[in-house]
């Protein structure tokens, strides 16, 4: 018979028990480490959103035809410096301080936090500090000169029957105010057709506006001078925008707004959904609006001032 080799070691029960304990210990999840990692990741995202750029969703019709409900866009935080409104979710107390301050150009699209609210609005800069601005019959008069307002071919926007907004204190079709302008083209496409004009600001910034009510309540405004550190903002959908023309009590901006309440500049559309999407991300593909992705939101500047 072959006798067992002297150098073969037999594991003792205690040694086996220790090995099993080590394996079980290795399988345990370091929950504290996981939470710490998630916290650092969240802090990195918030820092990026507060100092560099953040996504923004268009919930209202006030900037049609250039911005549509359902547009997702990128807002940069650094062009005008940083302030309390730059921080994500507005976790900082409202104040007048600004770091590395800058002034928007006429025609820039910016986000602003109204004095009586905590949500962001998005509007266009019409007048900058020192400008004198008035409105006569819906036409802007800037520093004593009427801003050119030239008629364009009526804009035709897809009717998007499932596009819902809550601007009237309850969910309703976003284009309820324009139902009279709805029509079906010979191709079968259903559109909202609205009177469209092109404005050209001093300096050459040009963009389209919608003006569907010839006798809007805010078509006339006496001249005022924009104070230092302020800007005068208006929506491109002129008769459906609560902006600097509209009193605070009517959910407007109540005149020129301080630059310390401006949280950034709109840069470009990433993608746009027509309202037919559901929670299932697979439905988003069919809801995508064609031709809107990566659309620049910077105002076109003419080569010659008009």
Image (tube, helix red, strand yellow):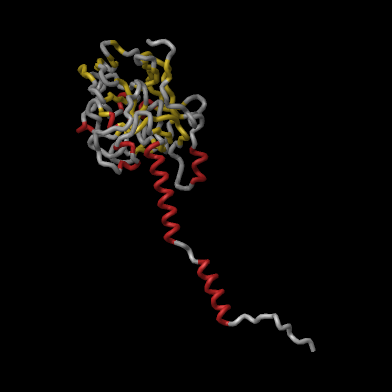
What residue is rendered at 26% in x and 22% in y? 216
What residue is rendered at 25% in x and 15% in y? 136
**Which quadrant holds residue 36?**
bottom left
Residue 183: give x, y in percent of width and height.
42, 26
Q: Foreground: 270 or 166? A: 270
Asked if 186 appears above or below 6 in the picture, the reply is: above
Q: Which residue is outermost to the bottom?
A: 1
Asked if 111 appears above or below 105 in the picture, the reply is: below
Q: Which residue is outermost to the front?
A: 7
Residue 109: give x, y in percent of width and height.
37, 27
Q: Foreground: 279 or 30? A: 30
Query: Can residue 287 be seen by looking at this rendering?
Result: yes
Residue 54: give x, y in percent of width and height.
40, 38
**Which quadrant holds residue 76?**
top left
From the viewer's perspective, tell me whether residue 140 is left or right of residue 181: left
**Which quadrant holds residue 247?**
top left
Asked if 226 appears above or below 43 in the picture, the reply is: above
Query: Can residue 176 be seen by looking at this rendering?
Result: no
Q: Quadrant of the C terminus?
A: top left
What residue is rendered at 32% in x and 13% in y? 147
Residue 259: give x, y in percent of width and height.
28, 29
């Amino acid at each position: 018979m072959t006798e067992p080799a002297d150098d073969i070691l037999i594991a003792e029960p205690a040694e086996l028990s220790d090995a099993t304990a080590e394996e079980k210990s290795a399988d345990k999840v370091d929950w504290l480490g996981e939470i710490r990692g998630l916290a650092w990741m969240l802090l990195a995202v918030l820092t990026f959103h507060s100092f560099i750029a953040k996504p923004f969703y268009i919930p209202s019709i006030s900037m049609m035809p250039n911005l549509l409900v359902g547009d997702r866009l990128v807002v940069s935080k650094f062009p005008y410096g940083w302030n309390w409104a730059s921080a994500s979710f507005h976790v900082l107390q409202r104040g007048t301080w600004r770091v590395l301050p800058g002034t928007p150009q006429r025609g820039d699209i910016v986000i602003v936090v109204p004095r009586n609210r905590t949500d962001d609005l998005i509007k266009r800069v019409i007048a900058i500090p020192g400008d004198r601005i008035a409105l006569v019959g819906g036409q802007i008069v800037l520093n004593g000169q009427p801003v050119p307002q030239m008629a364009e071919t009526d804009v035709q926007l897809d009717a998007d029957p499932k596009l819902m907004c809550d601007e009237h204190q309850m969910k309703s079709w976003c284009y309820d105010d324009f139902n009279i302008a709805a029509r079906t083209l010979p191709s079968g496409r259903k559109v909202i057709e609205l009177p469209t004009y092109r404005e050209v600001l001093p300096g050459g910034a040009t963009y389209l506006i919608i003006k569907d009510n010839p006798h809007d309540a805010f078509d006339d405004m006496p001249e005022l001078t924009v104070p230092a550190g302020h800007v005068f903002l208006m929506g491109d959908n002129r008769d459906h925008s609560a902006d600097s023309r509209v009193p605070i009590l009517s959910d407007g901006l109540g005149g020129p707004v301080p630059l310390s309440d401006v949280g950034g500049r709109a840069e470009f559309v990433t993608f746009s959904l027509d309202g037919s999407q559901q929670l299932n991300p697979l439905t988003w593909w069919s809801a995508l609006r064609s031709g809107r992705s990566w659309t620049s939101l910077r105002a076109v500047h003419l080569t010659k001032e008009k």
